[in-house]
Image: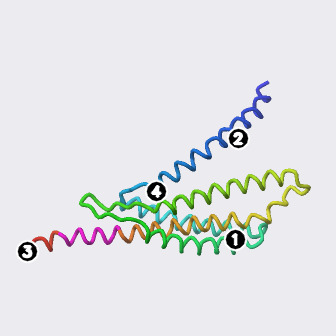
Amino acid sequence: MPLLLIPLALLALALLWALLIPIGLIQRYRYGKARRRALGWAVSLGATLSLLSLLLFFAGAWVSGHWIADAPLYAGAGLLAGLALGAFGLGLTRFEDEAKGLYYTPNRWIALGLTALIAARLCYGLWQGLHAWGADAPDSWLPRQGGLFAVGGLLLGYYLIYTLGVRRRLRRHHRLRERAPLTGDMR
């Protein structure tokens, strides 16, 4: 009898996952456009983890290149686009130097665009999966997954450049704060 509940539990988990995806995307957008304080340890940790993620991503793209045509090429193209978008987004970010620290507000349109890109890629992947389910060859969808690597490269490139830019701006903020008392005493 308990073995009959396993398919029901799997179906319930799949339904829960499907219901939580829109909530997760809305929260991703809300956080993506929110004003934040740049904390040195958090920004440095984010930059380090972004670099590590990028290395693991390209290792995965290289291994997947055996099954997915041009996977490293798609990953590289996505990375280049993400680096450019990250630099553009950094230019549109509003930075505020305050006595308590450096605050920044990312551009809401870029946050919305990245969230929409993730949602579109999820929908396209589900659509591909449903159509591949009825296909004759079960692995016929594999050669068409290069776009997944392009989107992954774009997101990783964006967040890497963005985090490094915030880190650079935070260091400049700290240098200016260290010099400020000296210039104030000279008057």
Q: Of the numbered discs in the image, which one, if any, rests on residue 62? A: 1
Q: Amino acid at mark 4?
A: Lys
Mark 2 or 1 closer to N-term?
2
Q: Nearer the viewer, residue 25 or 51?
A: 25
Residue 121 appears at what percent x and percent y?
67, 58
Badge 3 density bin: few <14, some 14–19, many ≥20, Cα 10 Å: few
Residue annotated with mark 4: 33
* Distance in Å between CA atoms under marks 1 and 3: 60 Å
- Of tags 3 and 4, which is closer to the observer? 4
Tell me the quadrant of the picture where the C terminus can be found: bottom left
**Residue drawn 70% across the image and 66% down it:** 147
Q: How many numbered discs, if any?
A: 4
- Of the numbered discs 3 and 4, the one sitting upstream in the chain is 4
Per the image, is 177 magenta? Answer: yes
Relative height, residue 118 to residue 20 (above, below): below
Asked whether, in this view, residue 136 is left or right of residue 77, the answer is right
- For marks 2 and 4, the one nearer the N-term is 2
Q: Nearer the viewer, mark 4 or mark 1?
A: 4
In three-dimensional space, the C-alpha distance between marks 3 and 4, rounded to whole angstroms, equals: 40 Å
Residue matched to label 2? 14
Dot 2 alpha-carbon crowd within 10 angstroms: few under 14, some 14 to 19, many 20 or more:
few
Q: Earlier in the sequence, mark 1 or mark 3?
A: 1
Mark found first going from the N terminus, 2 or 3: 2
Would you identify the image quadrant in which residue 70 lies? bottom right
Q: Amino acid at mark 3?
A: Arg
The span shown in magenta is: 170-180
Magenta residues, dominant SS class:
helix
Q: Are marks 4 and 1 in contact (CB under 8 Å)?
A: no
